[in-house]
């Protein structure tokens, strides 16, 4: 980080001498030692609904004599020379091979997509839905999912920061039962107060439960928070996972996980990345504008970022992921934690803004 704060202060007292000017500019162009990496979170964050900021005029220091123009030009040149280059893509290597891996996250996101499709079909059974959600088997969209050893239910409401939330897990299982036991048998019936069935208007036709809920929607929206966001914010990006066991010492000393090309800390960060970007066609591409693929958090990150509530938030999230991973490579854990906080806060805003959008539009 390069600052010219000291330059502004000194302008109040310097005289019109070249020697003094050179001393000021030399000091202003020195790199600050406060932070090793530039913050990627330059845009001021706002909540989904905020009052417009109050316009305040900052006090202006009176510049000294004829040196003001020269100082301004020199300071601009200093900043241009000192400005860090743009962050690279999420592409990290060790010994010429990628050190990034998040295949398990991609598998679980694909599983969630198929379960969502099943909860839009009258042919789905409770037994098969439960099998897919809790056991991770029975999938047809990709036969390799059954062999992955992964499942969605076991990673839901279970982040290490707060532990397993049994009530949330039970509610999600109850939604599956409600869909199979009540929505499917009344697939062609007309819905009424207290009775599941079909609701139609000029825009669409939906199947609802006895409360008038689209169970596929309540289930999938619950997974955005209890599954993807929980795993990112309350698990893989938290110290309870990043620093667990010997991860910190291993990462500092370059000790990789047995049989793998990454340290345990690198892999934890990558797994968080995978829960958001695991369905991107090319995860090493510039994902500051995400594809919105899938049915979970990436889809709504794109929608919120392209809307007028939190425009551009996807860029901040992506750059924080890249900067945080680089900080892990560099052993700069303060910067890692700062970037993790950006991601946690911004993705929580995405979830909140998605709810606001559905409630008001």
Image (cartoon, rainbow, N blue to C red):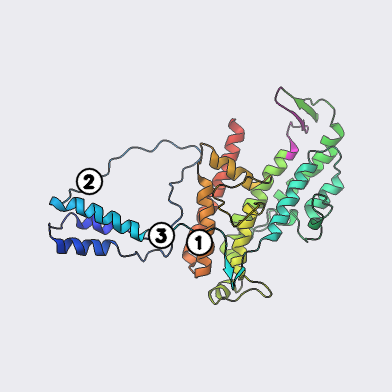
Please tell me how crowded label 2 is: few (under 14), some (14-19), or many (20+) other residues with Cα within 10 Å: few
Taking the view exactly as shown, the residue that stands out farthest to the top is: 202
How far is mark 1 from mark 3, CA to CA?
20 Å
Figure check: 154 above or below 300: below
Under circle 2, the secondary element is: loop
Mark 1 / mark 3, whichever is N-terminal? 3
First in sequence, mark 2 or 1: give its number.
Answer: 2
Question: Marks 3/2: CA distance?
Answer: 28 Å
Q: What residue range appears in magenta?
A: 202-216
Q: Is residue 300 visible?
A: yes
Residue 283 falls left or right of residue 41: right
Query: Which numbered mark, 1 or 3, is in the foreground of this view?
Result: 3
Q: Which numbered circle lies on residue 337?
A: 1
Residue drawn at point x = 82 percent, y = 35 percent: 183
Q: Is the magenta stretch mostly helix, strand or loop?
A: loop
- Gap in Å between the C-alphas at discs 2 and 1? 35 Å
Q: Which of these two is toward me, 230 or 325?
A: 325
Placement of 273 over or under 173, stated as above or below: below
272 or 31, nearer to the observer: 31
Check disc 2 and report the residue beneath it: 60
């Amino acid at each position: 980080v390069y600052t010219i704060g000291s330059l502004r202060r000194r302008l109040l007292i310097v005289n019109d001498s070249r020697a003094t000017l050179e001393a000021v500019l030399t000091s202003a162009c020195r790199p600050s030692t406060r932070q090793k990496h530039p913050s990627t979170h330059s845009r001021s964050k706002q909540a989904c609904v905020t009052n417009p900021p109050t316009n305040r005029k900052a006090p202006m220091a009176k510049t000294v004599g004829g040196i003001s123009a020269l100082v301004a030009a020199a300071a601009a040149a200093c900043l241009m020379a000192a400005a860090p280059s743009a962050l690279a893509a999420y592409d990290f290597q060790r010994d010429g091979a990628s050190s990034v891996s998040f295949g398990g996250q991609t598998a679980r996101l694909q599983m969630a997509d198929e379960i969502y499709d099943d909860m839009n079909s009258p042919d789905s059974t409770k037994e098969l839905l439960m099998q897919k959600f809790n056991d991770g088997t029975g999938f047809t969209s990709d036969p390799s999912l059954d062999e992955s050893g992964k499942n969605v239910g076991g990673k839901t409401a279970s982040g290490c920061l707060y532990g397993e939330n049994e009530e949330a897990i039970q509610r999600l299982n109850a939604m599956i039962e409600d869909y199979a036991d009540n929505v499917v048998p009344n697939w062609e019936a007309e819905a009424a107060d207290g009775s599941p069935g079909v609701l139609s208007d000029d825009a669409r036709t939906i199947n609802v439960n006895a409360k008038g809920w689209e169970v596929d929607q309540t289930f999938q929206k619950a997974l955005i928070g209890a599954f993807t966001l929980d795993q990112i914010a309350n698990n893989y990006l938290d110290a309870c996972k990043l620093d667990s066991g010997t991860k910190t010492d291993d990462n500092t000393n370059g000790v990789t996980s047995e049989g793998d090309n990454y340290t345990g800390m690198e892999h934890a960060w990558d797994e968080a990345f995978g829960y958001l970007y695991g369905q991107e066609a090319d995860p090493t591409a510039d994902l500051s504008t995400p594809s919105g693929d899938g049915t979970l958090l990436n889809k709504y990150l794109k929608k919120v970022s392209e809307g007028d509530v939190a425009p551009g938030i996807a860029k901040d999230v992506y750059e924080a992921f890249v900067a945080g991973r680089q900080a892990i490579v560099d052993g700069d854990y303060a910067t890692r934690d700062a970037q993790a906080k950006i991601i946690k806060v911004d993705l929580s805003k995405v979830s909140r803004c998605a709810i606001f959008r559905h409630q008001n539009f």
